[in-house]
Amino acid sequence: MNDYKALYARKKLTADEVAARVENGWLIGMDAAIGQTPAIIDAICRRAESSSLSGVRVQMLLDTYPYAFFADDHLSGRVTGESWFASGGARKALAAGIADYIPNYYRDCPRHIRANYEYDAFCVSVSPMDKHGYFSLGTVSSYSPAMIDKAKHIFVEVNENTPRAVCGTQLHISQIDGLVENTFDLPTLPAPTLDEVSITIGNLIAELIPDGACIQLGIGAIPDAVGMALKSKHDLGIHTEMFTSSMVDLIECGAVNNSRKQIHRGKSVTTFAFGSKAINDYIDDNPAIEILPVDYVNNPEVICQNDNMISINAALEVDLFGQVCAESIGTKIMSGSGGQVDYVRGACQSKGGKSFIAFSSTAKGGTISKIKPVLTPGAVVTTSKNDVDYIVTEYGIAHLRGQTLSSRVSQLIAIAHPDFRDELRFEAKKRGILI
Ligand code: COA
């Protein structure tokens, strides 16, 4: 232990000292959410503002802190953000033309990282060092192992509030070039507002989820509402991309015990977690949750090994073929694909599995139907017509997979908001896709 303590002391730096080591043209990688290192990135941005540092690129997914290079163009050419997901600050910066984005299926990120990128530095937030010299990467594994393999330097921020995930990625003090102590309260996500529409949708989906099912919940209020509606179920399991607050509730109320999973029985499996403080408290020192790399967790061939795999994700609009757009409003990028397609495919290949794409029937105060004759020009197709399974609104459930085009059209019109059904029917008849 003494040797590790001495090594720790020798590697201790300030964020400004880490920033001072960054050279022109460096590519810096970070993983998702609270795995990121705000102090180091802020120091790099400050240095770029006051020196000739230029051409630095910073990659991350789900940017969680207010990075200066996403705020406006004053760091243009000096530090540029590249997002693997295009949410938050990255979404706004993309709209302003000052950031870049790497389209992907989340499961493929480690493969892209290994094939396409050489990182000068990988930066990650970690829990305090244990007596064996290891730091836990806390709530995130995702593509960290791939970036660790491809990085010339590794810098960590040690935050005493980062939970120690016993079944997650670890870094040893000997692998680290520098560490910055930076303890602060980890950010949380506000609890989604569960309105009447979300609750109705949650209850509709819950009726089709049997006891013993294994669940994945995506981002947003509706997946969360489904989580809330599952509290009366028994023996549920969790195999998911993002471990959410409602999952902790399901574990604590006894609905989830992972007892009927075919793989990782007795354990919840995720690739990262983000939400409430309760999530971090649950993960800390808990062998009942495994935080594993995304190329394993999100691989449809892994996902489908659990029977009755149920995936629930959101969308922005759907056309009458059942093409799902979950990433853009017309040409405006709203997010990446994340793991939506990974879980649609994995759930559909699972014995008894089902995939649900759920959303309120309208947007903007009821003025826009999310079920459209054709997608808005520029809309990005996330889930294709060949992969889509169930579509759900507050008006009901459409089962599209394997169905004729005409059946899809009539089912989708039946779950559209009543104010838009005549128009949808008229457009479908005009195109000859409703017989
Ligand atoms: N036309 C115009 N505006 C629309 C719209 C439409 N068809 N659908 C939604 N909007 C607007 C909403 O009004 C809202 O606007 P506001 O921010 O001004 O209130 C905004 O777009 C977001 O819509 P909302 O329904 O609240 O979306 P969400 O926060 O639940 O997120 C996704 C939805 C699709 C962006 C989110 O699920 C996502 O990131 N998906 C990525 C793919 C995925 O599912 N990955 C798996 C989990 S990581």
Image (spheres, rainbow, N blue to C red):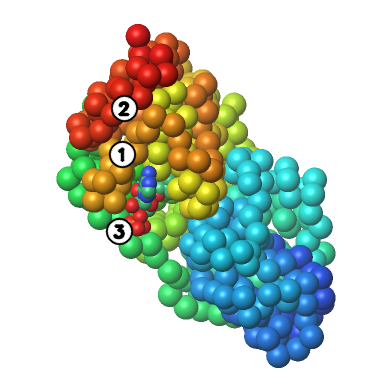
Q: Nearer the viewer, residue 127 or 422?
A: 422
Residue 424 is labelled as 2
Q: CA distance from mark 2 to mark 1?
A: 10 Å
Q: Residue at point 31% right, 18% down?
A: 410
Which mark is first along the chain, 1 or 2? 1
Q: Amino acid at mark 1?
A: Ser
The residue to which callout 3 is attached is 191
CB of mark 2 within 8 Å of CB of mark 1?
yes
The answer to whether mark 2 and mark 3 are in CB contact below 8 A is: no
Q: What is the quadrant of residue 258 in the picture?
A: top left
Q: Residue at x 47, y 29 (%)?
A: 323
Tag 3 and tag 1, C-beta contact below 8 Å: no
Is label 1's Cβ within 8 Å of ligand 1?
yes
Dot 2 falls on a residue whose secondary structure is: helix
Residue 418 place in picture, x, y as percent: 20, 31
Spatial CA span between label 3 and label 1: 26 Å
